[in-house]
Image (tube, rainbow, N blue to C red):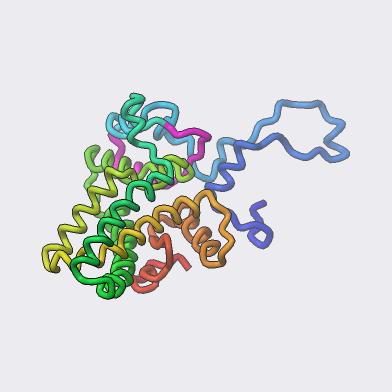
Amino acid sequence: MKDELEHLHSDAAYDMLETYFIGDLATDGSAQKPIVPLESDKNTSTLGKKEAFIDVRQPMLAQVWTKNFKKDVYMKQVHIPRHVNYSAPIFGHPALEMFTKTPWWVVPLVWTPLWATCVYYAIGAVSLAGTLMLAPIGLLIWTIIEYTLHRFLFHVDDILPDNRYALTAHFLLHGIHHYLPMDRMRLVMPPALSLFLAVWIWTFFNSFLPTPIVLGLATGTIPGYVGYDLIHYYLHHGRPFAAHLREMKTYHLDHHYKDANLGYGITSKLWDRVFGTVLY
C-alpha cells in the first residue's frame, strides 16, 4: 500500500484505513497456524494520534480552553484530520450546538434576498448598465477576499499568540474545520459569521467609495461568496463532473491532508499563483 508507484496517499489516509483493519490475508502456510486475536500495529500510527489532544465525544471548545495546549502542540494536532460519523459537540448544550451547525442550503436562503435587494438599489443608483459593469468587478474582488480571508484570517497561525485565548478562538473560527474536515454541518459559514464579515467588508469599501458604487460591486461579490461556500461544500462531499472542479477538489483536499500552509484558493488557484502559495 505504501509503494508510491502504486499508491500515493497521505499519512491521514493511512491512519483512517487503520480503523478498517480486519487482519492479514492467510497464506497456505499461515492458514494451518492457530488463530490468534487480530490486532493492527496501533503503536506505529503515522500520525502519532496516541498523543493526548481533544476527545471528540466531549465538548471540544472547553477542552481547548482547559487543557491549555502549547501552541506548537495545538497547531500540529489540529491539522491532523480526524473523522467521525456525527457532528462532534463544540459547546455541549443543545441550544448552543444548534448555532454551530449550518446546512449548505441556508447560504443561498439567507443571501439571495440580500443580493436581490442590492441589485434593486444598485440599478436605481447607477442604472442597469452600470450595475452590469460593476458586477464582474465585484466578482473579481470576491476572489481576492476569498484568498485573503483564508490565508490571513483563518490561517493566521504564525503570528497567533501562544495562549489559551488565541488558540480557543482559532479552534472556533477555523481549527475545527481542519480537525474534522468532513463534518457536513460545519462546512459552510454560519450566517452570523458571514454577515459580520460582510458588514466589515462593506464598511471598508464604503470608507473610500461612494455607496452606489459599493452597491453595484455587491451585486457581484454576493454571488461570488455564495458560489464559494457551496463549492467548498461540494469539494468535500460531491463528485464533480467538470474538470476544473475535479482539479479543485484534489487541490483543496491536499490543503487539508498534505499541507495546510499552501493552497488557500477554493474556487481557483489564481491568487495562489500570484502570491506563491500554490500547492503544485
Q: Residue at x 24, y 44 (%)?
A: 162
Residue 274 placement (x, y as % from top left): 35, 74
Residue 193 placement (x, y as % from top left): 27, 45
User: Residue 159, located in which quarter of the rendered image?
Assistant: bottom left
Name the magenta segment's main secondary structure: loop
Q: Residue furthest left?
A: 207
From this viewpoint, is residue 206 visible? yes
Query: Is residue 194 shown above or below 207?
Result: above
Which residue is more in the foreground, 28 or 112?
112
Callout count? 0
Q: Which residues are magenta?
A: 68-88
Could you tell whether 240 is left or right of 125 in the image? right
Which residue is more in the foreground, 210 or 197?
210
Which residue is more in the foreground, 252 or 103?
103
Q: Residue at x 37, y 55 (%)?
A: 226
Query: Is residue 95 shown above or below 76?
Result: above
Q: Residue at x 31, y 65 (%)?
A: 220
From this viewpoint, is residue 178 visible? no
Could you tell whether 1 is left or right of 128 in the image? right
Residue 88 placement (x, y as % from top left): 43, 32
Query: Is residue 24 shown above or below 120?
Result: above
The question of residue 203 being in magenta is answered with no
Could you tell whether 158 is left or right of 26 in the image? left
